[in-house]
Image: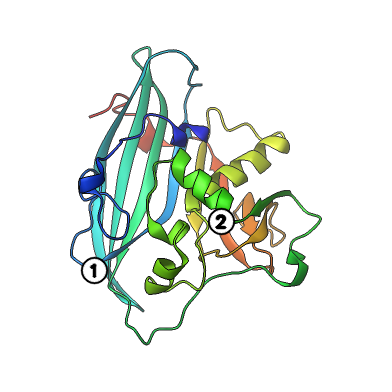
Amino acid sequence: MWHITQLLEAVPQHLIGADGHPLVGLPTPPAAGARRMFAGGRVWHRRPLVVGREATRTSRILTSRETEGRSGHLRFVTVRHEYVQDDELAVRDDHEIVYRPERPASAPLIGCTGGPGDSGAAGRGTSLRVDPVLLFRFSALTYNAHRIHYDRDHARTEGFDDLVIHGPLQAVLMAEDLRTRGCELLGKVFSYRLLAPAVGSQTIWARRPGDGGQADVEVATGEGGVSASGALAEPDQSDLPGLQPA
């Protein structure tokens, strides 16, 4: 999953919006005031990316749909990134982005925080201690200037009660936990969803779910809530045609 730190678009400073998101590229906010969040992804690791050898990333919008949710009108956009090396597809990475309406001033703040001693998920799986410095460094690694990850005052204007832990960071943590258990990602499709915002300084844990459901891994916050889940599967027919970027 560490391909997410490679082949990134460096947007000039004058093309960065007030919330830290680029005003150009894929995707862009659909309307003034819309809040953009990472909702999940689906990654097919077809072959290894080799360090030190030229590679190309091509991005395009795959789907866009609109719906009504509890918080108002929502727009979901799937962006497909394809990484090609030696003229062969190595990684296909679909990102699910959701656009939410502007937050009403009276709406309560949300977020899964750490509990006393961050003991809710202790002793199980792969742990990661998250603090503002780690969030800042991960933002730098991924060229993610969204202010909810490093500007606490701005995070509150978007409805969170503290700095937000990146969705892709939780995806990497889940993938690392699967690797430590001997689960091979190469040749498989890794799908994951962000279930609830995880916020603030705390220890989060990637672990095997205990409910016997379809997920192979989940992220538990310090207070014991589940903020993300993921599953491994074989590629299906939708992965096979059109291997080269469109």
Is disc 2 in contact with disc 1, using a CB cutoff of under 8 Å?
Answer: no
Displayed quadrant of residue 36: bottom left
Display coloring: rainbow
Is residue 237 in sight in this rendering?
no
Residue drawn where x is 31% and y is 49% of the image = 78
Displayed quadrant of residue 157: bottom left
Residue 122 is situated, as x and y percent measured from the top left of the image, at: 78, 59
- Foreground residue, 13 or 36? 13
Residue drawn where x is 37% and y is 27% of the image = 83
Q: Is residue 90 left or right of residue 202?
A: left
Q: Badge 2 local density, few (<14 within 10 Å), some, or many (20+)?
A: some
- Foreground residue, 113 or 240? 113
Q: Where residue 33 is drawn, which disc sits there?
A: 1
Dot 2: element = helix
Dot 1: element = loop
Q: Residue furthest bottom?
A: 106
Q: Where residue 132 is drawn, which disc sits there?
A: 2
Tell me: residue 202, above or below residue 59.
Answer: below
